[in-house]
Image: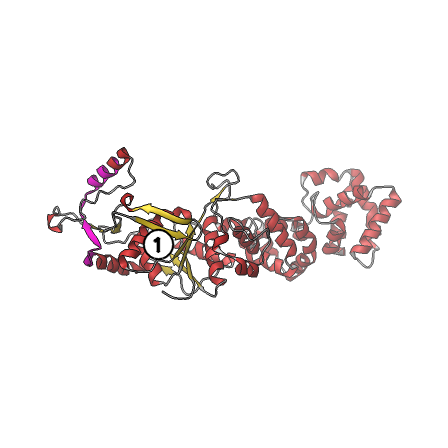
């Protein structure tokens, strides 16, 4: 086996890349990258009925969006079926495996008997030492591993610690089905060996599989990779993660407007800790990540924490970088297509100018894109109900009175705008808020937005005055 650290991420392409899979991929990636090693990608597509090309594409897309690259080409497990059969037949020839001719009815009876007697072992080994010449006619056999019947199978797991199984409780697992297709257990062992995998890092729902797979490794005389079985992710209530908790595809998180860097930081802290540190750059994660720091208890998913973290990352991201990320995800997020269709160089510059104010108030890119709608809204501005309620006849008359002040303003800077509006409010004996709120409604159609002087500055003098005249004209005609 190679001295270089080699990890692998091995998803089944039966659906999206879910949040637990994304974390597993991240842990494999961090462990390999932190040791100058490789992370390989293997698509475990042996379940032909459920595996789809669309799911493969979604997995690759999700990993790429998260910023997790892999070494070499993605490998299809199904394409290696001939190699898996070859290994099963070699075990058969060495007396380490045997043909089993038990019928489906016999197997059902064995399972029922095991359930009645409370035994974990389901198959009773009836063909283990029988001569294949006794086989009933017309029955296509499976190949089973001749597993040890005494002693223990032990995994020294780098997260779970020492895990022991009594061999008398483990039955002879199927290696090759009657139609000559390899089972998952065999395929995983052969592929990990042939790919020189040194560390198997995966969810602890695979822990029982580790015992089976170690028996195959031992039968073949192959070294067993280091194992690390990480606890699953639960919801905030401690129950198994469901869609209401956040058990969604990673593509859904992109659509909800989370940044890849924030997702990486959030995922790495689901079950792994490094002192009290919460925020990690990618470089810090790579340098600090150790398997021994993964806890044994299930991690709890918390949307509020993810949102707060994402808001922090958005505020820390330079404006131009954040705009580039927005442009990258426009096809995937709510409101994105509308913005993409209008994204002229002029609007791009307005977005860049408005970014400091926009990102201060948003926790996701969806919120940011939504709050930026005022930049490209068409006149006359569509008013939300609460905004329309603010634009009373008195408020419209006030805007009409403010227009000459703004029309004569030069230069059109945030500082000068604030001085002018404050001066107008004082002259009229008004509080600043009672001027600013109707202005906000007239300029954005909403009651919430970035600071009103920022809105005026970014929209520019011509557009701002035009929007205000639209509302003031109505006052004159009232």
Give how far across and how far down residue 60 sits, in percent: 44, 57
Range of magenta residues: 92-112
| Nearest to the observer: residue 380 or residue 11 | 11
| Nearest to the observer: residue 43 or residue 144 | 144
Q: Quadrant of the N terminus?
A: bottom left
Q: Return the residue at label 1.
A: 45
Q: Is residue 4 magenta?
A: no
Task: Tell me the SS state at disc 1.
Answer: loop
- Asked which quadrant contains residue 103, the reply is top left
| Nearest to the observer: residue 41 or residue 49 | 41
On the picture, is 254 further left or further right than 358? left
Mark 1 burial class by Cα count in 10 Å: few <14, some 14-19, many 20+: many
- Work out which residue is located at the far right of the displayed protein and give it: 427
On the picture, is 93 further left or further right than 441? left
Q: Is residue 109 magenta?
A: yes
Give how far across and how far down residue 31 sits, in percent: 47, 59
The answer to whether residue 325 is seen in the rendering is: yes
Give how far across and how far down residue 36 sits, in percent: 48, 66
Q: Quadrant of the C terminus?
A: top right
| Nearest to the observer: residue 301 or residue 114 | 114
The residue at 46%/55% (across/down) is 25
The residue at 19%/58% (across/down) is 93
The residue at 54%/61% (across/down) is 287
Above or below — where is 162 with respect to 286? above
Labels in figure, total: 1
């Amino acid at each position: 086996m190679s001295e270089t650290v080699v990890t692998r991420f091995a998803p089944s392409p039966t659906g999206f890349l879910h949040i637990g899979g994304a974390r597993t991929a991240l842990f494999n990636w961090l462990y390999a990258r932190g040791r100058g090693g490789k992370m390989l990608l293997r698509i475990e597509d042996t379940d032909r009925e459920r595996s789809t090309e669309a799911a493969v594409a979604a997995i690759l897309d999700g990993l790429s969006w998260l910023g997790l690259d892999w070494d070499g080409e993605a490998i299809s497990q199904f394409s290696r079926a001939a190699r898996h059969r070859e290994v099963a037949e070699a075990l058969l020839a060495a007396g380490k495996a045997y043909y089993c001719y038990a019928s489906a009815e016999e197997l059902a009876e064995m399972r029922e008997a095991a359930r009645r007697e409370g035994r974990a072992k389901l198959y009773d080994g009836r063909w283990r030492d029988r001569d294949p010449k006794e086989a009933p006619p017309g029955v296509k056999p499976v190949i089973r591993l001749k597993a040890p019947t005494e002693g223990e199978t032990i995994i020294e797991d780098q997260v779970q610690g020492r895990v022991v199984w009594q061999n008398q409780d483990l039955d002879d697992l199927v290696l090759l089905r009657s139609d000559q297709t390899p089972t998952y257990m065999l395929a995983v062992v052969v592929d990990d060996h042939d790919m020189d995998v040194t560390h198997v890092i995966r969810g602890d729902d695979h822990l029982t599989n580790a015992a089976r797979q170690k028996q195959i490794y031992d039968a073949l005389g192959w070294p067993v990779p280091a194992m690390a079985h990480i606890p699953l992710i639960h919801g905030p209530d401690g129950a198994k993660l469901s869609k209401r908790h956040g058990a969604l595809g990673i593509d859904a998180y992109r659509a909800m407007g989370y940044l890849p860097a924030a997702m990486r930081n959030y995922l790495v802290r689901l079950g792994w800790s490094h002192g009290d540190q919460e925020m990690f750059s990618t470089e810090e994660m790579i340098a600090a990540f150790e398997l021994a720091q993964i806890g044994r208890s299930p991690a709890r998913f918390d949307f509020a924490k993810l949102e707060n973290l994402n808001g922090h990352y958005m505020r820390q991201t330079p404006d131009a970088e954040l705009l580039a990320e927005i442009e990258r995800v426009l096809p995937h997020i709510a409101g994105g297509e509308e913005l993409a269709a209008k994204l002229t160089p002029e609007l791009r510059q307005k977005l860049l100018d408005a970014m400091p104010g926009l990102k201060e108030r948003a926790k996701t890119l969806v919120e940011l894109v939504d709050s930026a709608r005022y930049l490209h809204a068409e006149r006359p501005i569509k008013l939300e109900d609460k905004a329309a309620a603010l634009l009373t006849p008195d408020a419209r008359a006030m805007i009409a009175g403010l227009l000459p002040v703004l029309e004569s303003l030069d230069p059109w800077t945030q500082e000068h705008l604030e001085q002018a509006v404050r001066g107008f409010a004082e002259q009229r004996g008004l509080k600043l808020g009672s001027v600013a709120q109707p202005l906000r409604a007239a300029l954005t159609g909403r009651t919430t937005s970035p600071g009103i002087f920022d809105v005026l500055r970014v929209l520019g003098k011509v557009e701002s005055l035009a929007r205000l005249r639209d509302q003031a004209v109505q006052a004159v005609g009232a």
